Image (tube, rainbow, N blue to C red):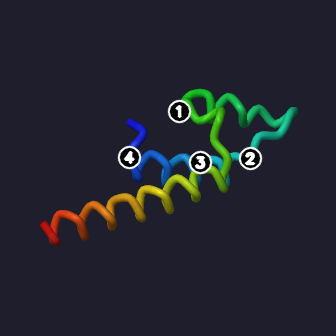
Amino acid sequence: MYFSPVRYGFAAMMVTQFPVEENKGTEFILEQYGLTGFTYWGCFSMLLLLFVLFRTLVIVSLVL
């Protein structure tokens, strides 16, 4: 669940598509998908971290 780049990409798109505003009711949409604790930059940094982690694992596995 935490190692899914698709999840973080989807969360970043949803947060930018439906920004939380108090009187608009868009927080309900984010709650439906379980994305209440995500920010765009948090998702971006997790995607970057996963990219570096997977790239490192590929290089290590090719060296071995």
- The answer to whether mark 2 and mark 1 are in CB contact below 8 A is no
Q: Return the residue nearer the eye: 16 or 6.
A: 6
Residue 13 shows up from this direction? no
The mark found on residue 4 in the picture is 4
In the picture of the structure, the residue carrying the numbered disc 3 is 14
The mark found on residue 64 in the picture is none
The three-letter code of the residue at mark 3 reads Met
- What residue lies at 71% left-to-right and 32% top-to-bottom? 27
Q: Earlier in the sequence, mark 3 or mark 4?
A: 4
In the picture of the structure, the residue carrying the numbered disc 1 is 33
- The answer to whether mark 3 and mark 4 are in CB contact below 8 A is no
Instruction: Give how far apart the Cα atoms at labels 3 and 4 are.
Output: 16 Å
Instruction: Give how far apart the Cα atoms at labels 1 and 3 are.
Output: 9 Å
The three-letter code of the residue at mark 2 reads Pro
Query: Horizontally, is 5 left or right of 42 in the view?
Result: left
Q: Nearer the viewer, mark 4 or mark 2?
A: 4
Q: Earlier in the sequence, mark 1 or mark 3?
A: 3
Q: Is residue 7 above or below residue 56?
A: above
In the picture of the structure, the residue carrying the numbered disc 2 is 19
Q: Residues within 10 Å of mark 2 (few under 14, many from 20)?
A: some
Q: Earlier in the sequence, mark 3 or mark 2?
A: 3
Residue extending farthest right: 23
Q: Is disc 1 placed on a helix, strand or loop?
A: loop
